[in-house]
Image (tube, coloured by chain):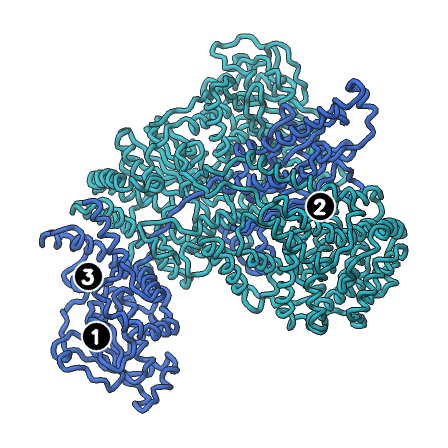
Chain colours: A blue, B cyan
Amino acid sequence: MNAIISLCHFCELHGPQVLFCTQPNHPQELGSGDSVVGVAEEHYNTMQLLLSRTQGEGGAQGLKSPVTEPSTPTPSFANHCEGCYSVKPGFVSHDDDVKVSYVSSRQPHNREVFSMIRQACLRSLSGEVCPGTEGPIFFGNDQQGHVISYSFHIRDFQARGFQRRYSIIIVMMDKIYLLNSWPFLVKNLKIVVEHLQEKAQKVYDVEQAKSPKEPNKLVSFHINPKPARSLMELTEDRNIFKILHVSFVWILKACGNRITESLLEGPPTEDSIIDMEKQEETEEGFIKLFKKSDTEEDEEEEKVTEKEEEEEQEESSSVSAVQNIRYLLRSLGAKKFHILAHHAVIGNQVIVRGALKSAVKSVLSALKCIVPKGCCRVVSYSQDYEASWKCNFLGLAPDVHIPNHIMATEMFVLVEVISPVGDNTDPSTTCAIDLDQLRECDFSLASPTSLPEKGPTVLTKMEMALKNENLTNEVLEQYLICLKEEWMNKVKVLFKFTKAGGSRSEEDTKKLLQVVGAQEEDKQLLKFWMTGLSCHYKTHILSTTKSHH
Amino acid sequence: MWKTPKFDPDQIRLVIYVDNERDRTLLFDSKAVKRNFEPQPKCYHGLRKFVTPKTKLCGPSEQICGGRQSKFLFTKPGSDVQSLEEIMFGSVGMAYTGSSLKVHLTKSPPQMMLTKVFVPEAPKRESLGSEVDSESLSLQSHSDPTEPKSISCTDRNGGYLAESVPMDVPLSSHSKRANFDNIDEDSGLASLTSSGSFHTPFPSPGSNTSSYNSYNSLHRRWMRVQYTSLESGLKKRNSQDNLVAHEQSFSSCTTSSASSSNKKQSKIALGILFGLEEDKDCQGVNRCFENFFFSHITLFEGHLDKLKAGVSHAYHNRKKFVHIVMEALENFRRDVQDLYTTPRLSEPVWLNMMSHSSYRYVMCEKFMKQFMFLVSKYDNKSTNFFMSTLVTAVLTHHLAWVPTVTPAGGTSIRTYLHNHTPNWVDTFAKTHPYNPLWAQLGDLYGAIGFPLKLARTVVVGKKADLVKKILYILTYFIRCSDVHENDELGSLKSCLDDLTFEMESERQDITPIIEKQPDAFLPVREENSASMRRHGETNLSKERIETSWNSSKISDESQGITHTERSHRKTSECSGDGAVKPSKFDEKDACDDGKIRLLCSPKECVRQISVEKELRRISKEYEDIIPKTIKSVKDNDLHLHLPDDNSLTDEGYHSIHPPDQGYSSLQRPCSLSVSQILEAVPIENVKNVSRSAEILSSGLIEIPTPNPVKPQAFSPSSSCSVSRLTQKLLEEQESCSKKEVTEIPTTKESDIRARYLKEGSNSMFDEYFTDPNIETKTIDNLDAKDRIVSYPLVKSESIRSSTDSINRELAGCANSPTAELQGTHENRLGSFGGGIRPRLSSFSRQYSTDRSHISGRPTSIAPGRCRSVTPTELSRRRHLSSTSSYDVDLSDPTSGCKELDMPNFSGELSSSSIKVFDRNFGRSLMAGYSDHYLSDFVLHGTSENSFHEKLRSDLEVAVQHSVLDEPIGEAVCVIADTDQWCVNVASSRDIDKPFEPLTKPVIASQLVCNLMEGVHQLCKLKMSSEFCLMHLEDRLQEIFFKSKMLAEYLKDVKKCNIKELTQLLGFEPGDLPLLVAIAGTHSPHLSLGVI
């Protein structure tokens, strides 16, 4: 809790005095505040600017108003007697779990805060009137903080009226929080106060019994020359301030933890779930139970390619992939690109062959961004042909032969990357070649399969966006995310409908397609993208279905 | 379901006082005003008694009425008016005279009192006109529109009559008013600019781009915590209070009494007394109201502000004072009654799904059924696509749904199940406790975007059944976090009881030693005592049992030696600080200090160890930095002598020994210019020093092991105690301590280093832990030229790294604490990056190192682990100690403090959702169907359809008095009319435009229409309700993505053509307001660029 709890005392000689303050501290933040000033100012300024724009000319003027330092008398050493004494230098408790230290000392270490506390102390003990003289009151304002003050009396045989006036104040800048916590705080302050009073009462009783004279009020009032006694003496407990420290720490911590909240955030995107699944696989070295069983065989293969993939991911961020795909579109021409992309989004194997390893990789990564992550099985650069069930994106060295039976039957598209440098490039140096090299490459396209005339709706939209030069790469990236998520949502519905919903008639399916807004030409795409759903989602859907049927 | 709490609005009593120069007068007491239903023919006095500030209130019988025929009958005010006056104003006039809020409780009769003391604001119109004319003009212009006819009618007569009566409205009051006007003007501006959480000059911990939700949830809470933090000073606010205070303090500073007294004159105290049940059996009723009152205080304050406005209006319109005030009071009563007793919706869907997740399936079924019913029936052309339009409006303004669909960033994969709780929440709440109620309130009002916008929704209609259904559906779309209460915090009482026992035993054990202190020091061999100490420490740390006592006793004794030295030093320091203190106190002080040291002495071993490690590490780390720093010290002619082992020993020995030589001898081992120091020492010091040194010499001549490094550590610090030293000397000290730090590890033989690290560090650091007069500042508090070390000022990087570190910490803390400590530590260190590592507070590093030391042991035992100190920190302290005055910022406030264990909290905290309305806004601000319009509720239904006046004032108040304690940019109200099938939005921006309609129609967003249609169709296909709801969430997420795209697009585009924009990005113009509103929650930079 961002609060300071203090014990205050009305000293006969010195008036209201702050005796003892407890306050939480976050050590790790002490320094960081300052390092940040430059940016913070910027931040502040923009906010001010925004505010003034929303609300007319008001913003700037408010800023100008100088803020006054509350004028408080600086306490000097001479100003303290025993009654005003508490601890030196103080106590500290470390809350290790949350890295908060609670510090108790005679006064807060920050000057401004101290003057605020002092002000609160003055008001608590002399300015404000508490009905019934003992009990809680709240007062305050935004500038000098908000205060709950619990004033009370401690029995003192030697004091005027046989009692001394104390108060415990809780100071916060957050008025709402403080008042919201009133019932809790007051309840616990009362416990502390009663604890003190009980002890003092005992001492008082003993002293009274010892006293030879009749406890005559007038006499003791006149005779008593002694200035205030310390709280330790009044309670006859040397540890009284330790007790206070512990109580205040307890209150601060408990009040901060008293009410908690739970809030929800959305599920991660399908893509990021896939990422996490992959990560978990590779980290733990074995396949989790939700992993599809039929891919077990790929496991080793995947591991081999893993390293490469990681490298690849690092060197090409998604933005550059977007850049690449735009370039690909330009160099292939809209028509060829459409064919290539069409193959890619419906799951036909895309084979990219070329001498420049980096160029081949770039082409693949570019194509990846139009397909959901779950659908991308990539072998980025191989010396052998890999079957389409292992990878739908395959990069090959230039002289790798594609098996004849594949050439004859399989659905695939072959992209030859013709680098301007020529084939004699040393493969070891190609790795280091900059992505810009892609720009100098030429591509040729070949596919044995003929595609339906009309491409999937989503592809058409993507192509339109790609061609639109008004969209920056960043916007395009967001746009692709939108489209992919939108269509993955349709896929989810379809999955639920077909896999989890039991048997469905043809008619129903047709209707469903209509409902999700998919056409005939989208069917192939939906089917393929369904394979890209994360295992988590699938198991989740299947399990929820089971539980309710 | 709903049980209306017991409440009588007549329990609410209003008293108003005015505070003029010396006078305090009761202006109004609702107890003394009775509504008079029969016309009162007679009237004894004028209105003056009540309305004129100057007259004292004499309290005889019944009196006063407004006109010939008053609506009110005046009786004797309450007997407690005198005491109430004191309570409200306070007994002593405070220097601060701005407006302030107070809460008091009175026991007999049991009452709760809410007070606002303020300077009344004059209505603007008055100030514009010329003097007398404006007066009468204002009277008329203010008279009727809102008031009931009966009053205004009689009043007009009464008003004119009263004019012939000599009124106490002198010219001076007009000038007074002019002053008010200034304030008014200022405050108007100030309320706009008063800083809110957005202004806090701290970065968001999640501001790195990877996390989507940075801006919404975590950011908001983080900002709030930082903004209200007291740790690093105050964040000044430019609120109204502030301005008034400034003005006041300014005027009180200036000697010209005329203006200042003028301003001081009129303060009004407005007190609301809530009568509570006196019956003991009704404690439950009282508690309920009390809980409600305090949790909803911010709403109460809003109504109080409304009342305040009414009263200050009345104050400047004296002839009708009572009527206006009564009117305002009636409104207040009604509002409070509404707020407290209106039946709440028992089934807010979203909240219930959150807090009863096991019944989720059933709730899904029910919700979908209702939803589908409404969509199929009322979402068509004949109803203007009412449902889609309504949902569009709600989604646009109640934005709290956005974070609930925002894809989670780096959460664990296991959290994939619908929406889920992010794991930072808990961690963050623990490390930076914030007010969940505040967060929840912000959610409910949709105030999470930028600029902050408060939204409410009213469903209007004659068909109660239909309205209720719609309300039910909307509770799914109007979302908020749920608040939980921790049940098992334990009680402070039991905590205290446990505590005292432990303390007592410790005390008894230790005190005898203190009393015969001098005798207690036996010559103990150093090696032994050291090992003993460690021995004792471990024993003690395991359990405090008697058997371990002996060993710890020995350790105490050996410790005592160091201790006495310290007390010696201490006294000299005290006296050096200026001999104002009585000498008697000095001794006592030192003695006290000694006791405390003794109490904790076993713990110091741990510190030793940690210091040792720390030093080793740091000596390495700093090797490359320190040479530079030495260069930066201007004084180059200083030579530090570092004698070898023996000579050091001798000198150190001597330095303590000869009592009469005082300071000069102390200075010897470090060859500083002794003469200078002597100059600065006041004569009294010598006396004190010698006396305390006498004690020392008598009791402690046989200091068993001379310590090679002690004297070194000694000298700079004792010079520190001299309060006024020249800057030159300071620098010498600096370099001295610097060198001491650097050269020991690098240039001296290894065994000296070892000894230094082991033993020397002890005394050296003790001094800094115990000396209250040595204050420190962080390096950042110094002028740049004074800095010893100049670090590169890294801006954005440092932000990112620090925010990263927080993120990481948060993530880290979520896991098991012990295992995590080390890791977090690493993270934190790493995150600061090489360049800025030394800069970011050595404190944090120490702290973390500290943690790493103790991470192995169970935290509950926590044997006195103290912070270790880095050399740089030491030198900084030395550097600053002499310049700083008594109360100075310590860079590390914990230094020197004795460590106590954290109080016990019983086990794991278990929490349960708060079901009752009195402490959960989610359960209290969604009301059901009511026969009249209600003010505060986020959502409610009503049959009333002509509430625009009330709405207008509500919107106005909402912007002026922010319930969230942050400046509100706009307040809106969605009005869904089921009779007309139209949805409108009223905005606070339009309330001042008399020629424009208050409300504007809402156009349905195509995205929302598609969403509704899609879900509807799925439902028709007999997909499970749960899946339909999941799909609904998915579609909402799609909308969120679209807004991200839009934000990205608008970032680059300066001028945007809406047509082009929609074509490019593929949505319709009708979607734009929705998408822009959403964008305001995640990309605040652009929300103002559009539209």
Chain letter for the residue marked with disc 1 in the picture: A
Label 2 Cα neighbours within 10 Å, binned few <14 / some 14-19 / many ≥20: some
Mark number for residue A335? 1
Mark number for residue B596? 2
- Identify which residue, A365 or A284, lies in the foreground: A284
Residue linked to disc 3 = A526
Asked if labels 3 and 2 share a chain, the reply is: no
Residue visible at 65% across and 25% down in the picture? A133
Give SS at disc 1: helix
- State whether residue B681 is above or below residue A18: below
Disc 1 residue type (three-letter):
Lys
- The x, y position of residue A257, in whole percent, is 50, 42
Asked if labels 1 and 3 share a chain, the reply is: yes
- State whether residue B149 is above or below residue B687: above
Front of the two marks 1 and 3: 3
Q: CA distance from mark 1 to mark 2?
A: 86 Å
Label 3 Cα neighbours within 10 Å, binned few <14 / some 14-19 / many ≥20: many
Q: Quadrant of the N terminus of chain B?
A: top left
Give SS at disc 2: helix
Chain letter for the residue marked with disc 3 in the picture: A
Residue visible at 78% across and 23% down in the picture? A211
Q: Are marks 1 and 3 in contact (CB under 8 Å)?
A: no
For marks 1 and 3, the one nearer the N-term is: 1
Q: CA distance from mark 3 to mark 2?
A: 76 Å
| Identity of the residue furthest to the left in this view | A506
Q: Are marks 3 and 2 in contact (CB under 8 Å)?
A: no
Disc 2 residue type (three-letter):
Ile
Label 1 Cα neighbours within 10 Å, binned few <14 / some 14-19 / many ≥20: few
Give SS at disc 3: helix
